[in-house]
Image (tube, coloured by chain):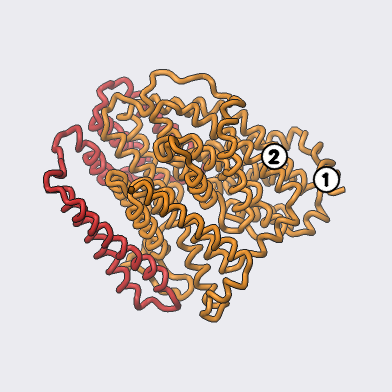
Amino acid sequence: MFFEESFSYLGNLVSFGNLTAMLLGVCVGLVIGAIPGLSPPMAIALLIPVSFEFEPATALILMVSCFAAGIYGGSFSAILLRTPGTSASAASAIEGYELTKKGKAIEAIRVSTFASVIGGIISGFVLLFLSPPLAKVALWFGPAEYFLIAMLGLTAIASVSFGSLSKGLISGLFGLCLSTIGVDHFSSYPRFTFDMIGLMGGIGILPCIIGLFAFAQGLDLCAGAAHGNISGLKTLSWRIWPRFSEMYKIKWSLIRGWVCGLVVGIIPAAGASIAQWIAYAWEIRRAKPGDQFGKGEIKGLAATEGSNNGVTGTSLIPMFVLGIPGGISAAVILGALTIHGLQPGLRLFKNNPEVIYTIMWGFIGANFIMAFVAIFMARTFAYLTLVPRGILGPMIILFSVIGVYTGTNSYHDIWLMMGFGVLGYFMEKYDFSTAGVLLGLVLGPIAEDGMRNLLIISDDAPVGFIMGRPVSLVIIFCIVVIISFSFSKKGKQGA
Amino acid sequence: MPVYIGRAISALSILAISAYIWFASEEFPANGHQLPQFTSGIAMVLSLFLLGDAFRNKDSANKINIEFTYATKKQYLILLLTIIYIPIMFVVGYFVTSFCFLLLSFLIAGVRNFRTVAITVVVSLPIMYAFFVNFLHAQLPQGWFF
């Protein structure tokens, strides 16, 4: 009955308005997602005024299409230039760029496209068929679970620090410390602001990610021979469509990435930024002798790309069913939903099934369209790897400066980005983990808020409180397994 | 300078910063000190590990090799140029300063194909302007000139 009802609205998708909305959303999302400094929430917000002209279903299809494509678009620049367009593609920059340097940019793009498109489609079907029951899972997560999920994310630092474990952990801890800068929203007390107005609001993710990855990469490119290019190739392969045999070899990495994305997506406030790191850490944990994680391992890229698009559909579940946005993009879509006169909740499924199911089908359709648009767009973007380093380096620096300014409209954030850029450049040079800093900065607020809320609701007895919650115990088990594995693996490497 | 001394200096710097964070966060109210002290405490322990590691693998012959040639230092010149470019852009405007910045940084980076430089600058700046201002309705830095 439920499946029949869902399928009965599939036909609504085939209209000029809905197909145009999908195509427009995908194109805008891909372009904006690929530009460092511009994020999917910004792209979705940009489309809200455009959507006023459309029917509610068409307007929301435009938004969800842009969201799915925006997350994927960030991977282009991450893989080809090591300048992630969004925080959701930061982990892809590690393996993706190493593959590009080996002259395998097109192969990396093929895998990224396949993992993202199929991940998005699976996530879309989960959204379509399992929304109401899965939304209840989101309600199992309280402060204790949020704190532990952040801790689980932090364990990824131990796995993704390829050189010294101590340096990797120090980088992550540095990121956590950075996340405490600014006015404390529990007590309104300024922490580590040194009376600087610009630091009162805290350190934004945007200047940090652009500085650590894009600006530092721009400086690094300027340092080399001006005439050489990143890939060392003179021409690019035209074989852009993925082959079955190629994907079959990395099937388990893809599946692990998708599963990770689907599960983490359901948890409000977790999102693609965390899912990709957990998927990447999981993949490293499953490494076999001969795998080259950190030096261009396609399995690592498959897992991160599968997870960040696997999140997209399921992160909309708590938003549609409970009115709890899973992330910033979902919050903007929630705003658009209410602007168009729709109230999220189970009544949305009862009172406006034609709208909600058409949107969900639209999300799945957008992922199909994304496959075709992305593959041709990726081919064009891939030419960037043939541009001389002396041209590319200054262009990336210029884009970083302009991207941060247009993204935050803050003069202060440009300097912050530059500070992170110089820091990132030297961290890379001396084997510290820039990914660890970013991970710490992303997870810090979730961990701290979770911990402080946990202390309040548990009456300063958090251990007993956590022990009484089955979901918390499952997460603790995962943390213990990952930590023990990471240390035993590093110990073996050290030996 | 031997590499192990450099590592020891890095470890001591991390230790000093962590100690500062620990003591500075003591006065934070409403449990606001917990995360900074938790992270700085672990960082202090890890920096001691790094310090011990530096002296355990002591090799006086292994020295930090700093080359002072143009080829190895040109990225710092571009960094300096960026530091000058940012405040000037807010006085003079996006187009003129970005044009000069790109031109100079291409030259510092070592690009000598002036046709490529000219085409890149002339094509990329208006496209960026049109994309950000006309399409995204974002604000680019404005000054005497647009």
Q: Amino acid at mark 1?
A: Phe
Give the SS element for disc 1. Answer: helix
Residue contact between numbered discs 1 and 2, judged by CB atoms under 8 Å: no
Q: Which chain is red?
A: B
Host chain of mark 2: A
Nearest the eye: A96 or A163: A163
Is the residue at mark 1 from the same chain as the one at mark 2?
yes
Q: Which chain is orange?
A: A
Q: Residue at x 42, y 57 (%)?
A: A440
Tell me how far mark 1 sits from mark 2, CA to CA: 16 Å
Q: Position of residue B87 (x, y in %)?
A: 29, 48
Q: Residue at x 41, y 26 (%)?
A: A103
Residue hosting label 1 = A3
Q: Position of residue B76 (x, y in %)?
A: 22, 41
Q: Position of residue A473 (x, y in %)?
A: 58, 65
Which marked residue is nearer to the observer: mark 1 or mark 2? 1
Q: Amino acid at mark 2?
A: Ile
